[in-house]
Amino acid sequence: SSKSLFEQVGNSDEYIAEILYYEGKIFNETGKYKQAKQSLEQCLVLGVTDQPNEIDTKATIQLSIAQLNLGNKEEALKLASEGLKEAKQLKLGNATQEVYLALSEIYERVGDQQLSNKYLKQYIKLSDSLFEVKKLLFTKAKSQYLLANKDAIQQQNLADLEEEQQAENSLNQLTTILSIALITILSLLTLSLYKNNNIRLKTNNMLHKKNSELIVAKEKAELASKTKANFLSTVTHELRTPLYAVTGITNMLLDENPKPEQVQHLKSLKFSGEYLLTFINDILQINKIEANKVDLDPEVFNLKKKIENVISALNNSAVDNSIKMHFDFDKNLPEVYNADQL
């Protein structure tokens, strides 16, 4: 530390005392009053002289503050009074101001409010005086500095003005560039919106045209579907009338005891007529499905018998074409079903 260095040099009591003073002051300001008391007492021991000096006076005042905060009010008052006397003798304005504040706090602690207020007023008065003196000294020093450095200050002011002008020019240039960029962006955005609007208008016109075409196509399709339905209904009606006659006559012939060799042919004729009627009905059903008018018509029928009748009806054609048909119905399957035959 600096204190150790001074001790090595020798004849350094004055410097060590000053270091101890500042050390004690720092301890006071940080609330370490025991360490402050120790450092300040060492400072006063080293700084003992026949005449009071500035460091001793300031150390005495700081020691009074440490003693006060350690609860030693009488010792604090004694030290503060001694410090005030020396500060006035040495005409130490700052030290006098400091001891006034310390005495005000000491008397407040001992309960003497009158003396506390007295020293507080003196502290405030001296503070104002010192402030005015510092202000006056600062004003004089400032005036002297301005006179001594008039040319340099003018040059500095010109340099500052030029720098501000350059900064303003740079700002204006930047503003111009940004404005141009903004105008360019807005122009491009406007052009893009214009093109998009034209595309949207063309698309809407095309959609309206296609929609009109679809409506016409729909109407034509509906008309064609209706025409087809009417045609199929008429044709199937015309076909069913003679088929009913064929199946009816076939039933009559079967009831009149035909020859044995004719029975099979009559049964085939009967099934073919019924099958053709069923086929026509299926066409009508498909037409209804296309028109979304179909209804399920469940009924009980023998699936095995239906298949056998189909084979019987197609048997003559198969024989003529040298085709052999074989039918095998699984015994595990039921023969009778209740469903829509279509």
Image: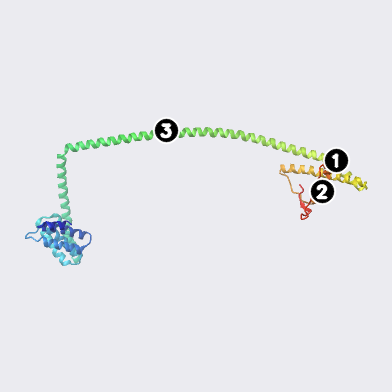
Disc 3, SS:
helix
Return the disc, 3 or 1, that comes first in the chain's sequence.
3
Q: Nearer the viewer, residue 156 or 87?
A: 156
Q: Is residue 43 above or below residue 187?
A: below
Q: Give neighbour class at mark 2: few <14, some 14-19, many 20+ (Cα, 10 Å).
A: few
User: Which residue corresponds to the image point at 56% horizontal and 34% vertical from the top-left?
Assistant: 203
In the picture of the structure, the residue carrying the numbered disc 2 is: 308
* Total number of numbered discs in the rendering: 3
Q: Give neighbour class at mark 1: few <14, some 14-19, many 20+ (Cα, 10 Å).
A: few
Horizontal and vertical percent position of residue 219: 68, 36
The answer to whether residue 106 is visible is no
Three-letter amino acid code of the residue under disc 2: Glu
Three-letter amino acid code of the residue under disc 1: Pro
Q: Nearer the viewer, residue 260 or 66?
A: 260
Residue 184 is labelled as 3
Horizontal and vertical percent position of residue 340: 76, 49
Q: Nearer the viewer, residue 318 or 168?
A: 318
User: Which residue corresponds to the image point at 77% horizontal and 39% vertical from the top-left?
Assistant: 232
User: Which residue corresponds to the image point at 16% horizontal and 43% vertical from the top-left?
Assistant: 142
In the picture of the structure, the residue carrying the numbered disc 1 is: 242
Horizontal and vertical percent position of residue 328: 79, 50
Distance CA(mark 3)–CA(mark 1): 86 Å
The answer to whether residue 184 is visible is yes
